[in-house]
Amino acid sequence: MDKKYMECIATMDLSTYNYKILLFLNIQSYTQSQIANMLGLQRQNVNKYFKELEAYGLVSVEKTEGRNTFYKAVTNLRLIKQNVKGQLKLESFI
């Protein structure tokens, strides 16, 4: 993770679990079930966190194997949605 990416996500109003999920997904791709097991959370709660991260444009689907969907973190600042109310503009990070 580069410095500008870290500065960008640090300004977002994310929960602690959202940040933890992003840290895992910056290392490699995981399914929601794998993340739930690693964090000791119910899968339904993890699904809620993933929806929040997807709304910000911070995660995307990397691949699907059967019924398993693997997600990865989006680290390209140009792809991260910064037009969310209360957030800094993307130009300040590029």
Image (spheres, rainbow, N blue to C red):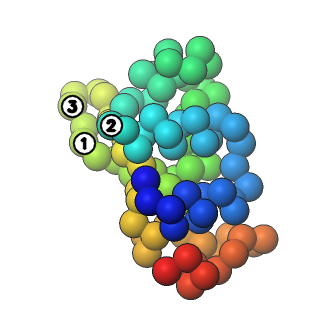
Q: Is mark 2 on a helix, strand or loop?
A: loop
- The residue shown at (50%, 18%) is 38
Q: Mark 3 points at which residue?
A: 65
* Residue 15 x/y as whole percent: 71, 42
Question: Which amino acid type corresponds to the residue marked 1 in the rendered image?
Answer: Lys
**Few, some or many residues within 10 Å of mark 3 (<14, 14–19, 20+):** few
Residue lying furthest front: 3
Residues at discs 3 and 1 in contact (Cβ within 8 Å): yes
- The residue shown at (59%, 15%) is 40
Residues at discs 2 and 3 in contact (Cβ within 8 Å): no
Q: Mark 1 points at which residue?
A: 63
**Few, some or many residues within 10 Å of mark 2 (<14, 14–19, 20+):** few
* Residue 4 x/y as whole percent: 51, 67
- The residue shown at (60%, 72%) is 82
- Which of the marked residues, 2 or 3, is nearer the chain's N terminus? 2
Q: In this view, does 26 lie to the left or right of 20?
A: left
Q: How far apart are marks 2 and 3 (CA)?
A: 16 Å
Q: Is mark 1 on a helix, strand or loop?
A: strand
Mark 1 vs mark 2, foreground winner is 2
**Residue 28 tag number:** 2
Q: Distance between the residues labelled 1 and 2?
A: 12 Å
Q: In this view, does 5 lie above or below 86?
A: above
Question: Which amino acid type corresponds to the residue marked 3 in the rendered image?
Answer: Glu
**Few, some or many residues within 10 Å of mark 1 (<14, 14–19, 20+):** some
